[in-house]
Amino acid sequence: MRLLFIRHGDPDYEKDSVTEKGAREVELLADRLAHEEIAAFYLSPLGRAQVTAQATLSRLGRAGITCDWLREFDGTVTDPQTGEKRIFWDFLPSFLEEYPALYSLDGWQSVPFVRGSDVPRKYAEVCRGLDGVLAAHGYERQGRHYAAVHPNRGTLVFFCHFGVTCVMLSHLFSLSPVPLLQHFAAAPSSVTAVYSEERREGVAQFRCASFGDVSHLYAAKEPPSFSARFCETFDSDERHD
């Protein structure tokens, strides 16, 4: 089985849609997907993901299934240093150095400011949602692997967001989500491809073949959006916070 996790086009967060550039990106993405054999489409309910999906779905004459758990991951924690509520990602390196357990699969949810927040509950909701979809397509979660009950080479497409994609990948790979959220960046309209591997009959795991691929943009000479990244050097006018 192949899973394609697609981030929405360049976002207009104020309108929960895509920008003019984003509209170009999603059409180029639709060009890329137009000749794919896709078993099913799953969509975030948020507008920017819906607009992105519609460009492909209308081209193919298909419909997708909207899942509330695919919305952008919005779990919040109370910052122990400031007492302020904040989204559970994009911590500064100096902060992370004080909480090394955040990088541990078995320890990240036990960090006090995480344990007392809504993050574990929302993380579990995403994991249940993903496992429900995979079970419906033949792969059932068993511990840290999947039983290949009905193994197949079908492709599932998820039109969603960067944060929730990192959460899903962390579940598939049995990792803490923190290193993915902190050290990876997926540009708008990018495609992350994950394949199942059944090296022993009936036992499957998933492996990432490509992360944040924007070759459809480069092929059309459309530059990727900067969104999801921070300043490359501190003296630049790129995003700092």
Image (cartoon, rainbow, N blue to C red):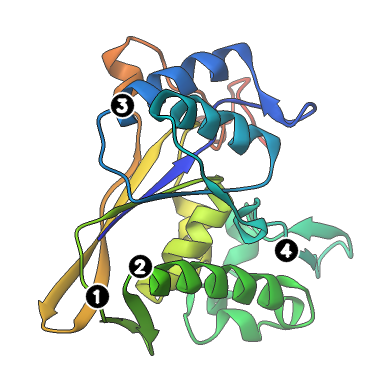
Secondary structure of the residue carrying tag 4 is: loop
Q: How far apart are marks 2 and 1 (CA)?
A: 7 Å
Q: What residue type is labelled 2?
A: His
Q: Which secondary structure lies at badge 2? A: loop
Residue bearing mark 3: 32
Q: Which amino acid does label 1 sit on?
A: His
Nearest-to-viewer mark from 3 and 1: 1
Q: Is residue 208 left or right of residue 187?
A: left
Answer above or below: position of 158 versus 133: above
Rendering coords of residue 82 (x, y %): 86, 61
Residue 231's place in the image compared with 125, above or below, is above
Q: Of marks 2 and 4, which one's residue comes earlier in the chain?
A: 4
Residue 232 percent coordinates (x, y): 49, 31
C-alpha distance separating marks 4 and 1 = 34 Å
* Quadrant (top left/top right/bottom left/bottom right) for the N terminus: bottom left
Choose mark 3 or mark 4, whichever is in front.
3
- For the question of whether residue 12 can be seen, the reply is no
Quadrant of the rendered image containing residue 46: top right
Seen as rendered, the residue at the extreme right is: 83
Along the line of sight, which residue is nearer the eye, 197 or 112?
Answer: 197
Residue located beneath label 2 in the image: 137
- Label 2 crowd bin: few (<14), some (14–19), many (20+), radius 10 Å: many
Q: Name the residue under label 4.
A: 75
- Image position of 192 (left or right of 240): left
Residue position marked by numbered label 1 in the rendering? 150
Where, by quadrant of the figure, is residue 78 drawn? bottom right
Q: Is residue 5 left or right of residue 108?
A: left
Residue at image point 49% right, 67% down: 130
Depth check, front residue: 22 or 116: 22
Mark found first going from the N terminus, 2 or 1: 2
Q: What is the secondary structure assignment of the residue under circle 1?
A: loop
Q: Earlier in the sequence, mark 3 or mark 2?
A: 3
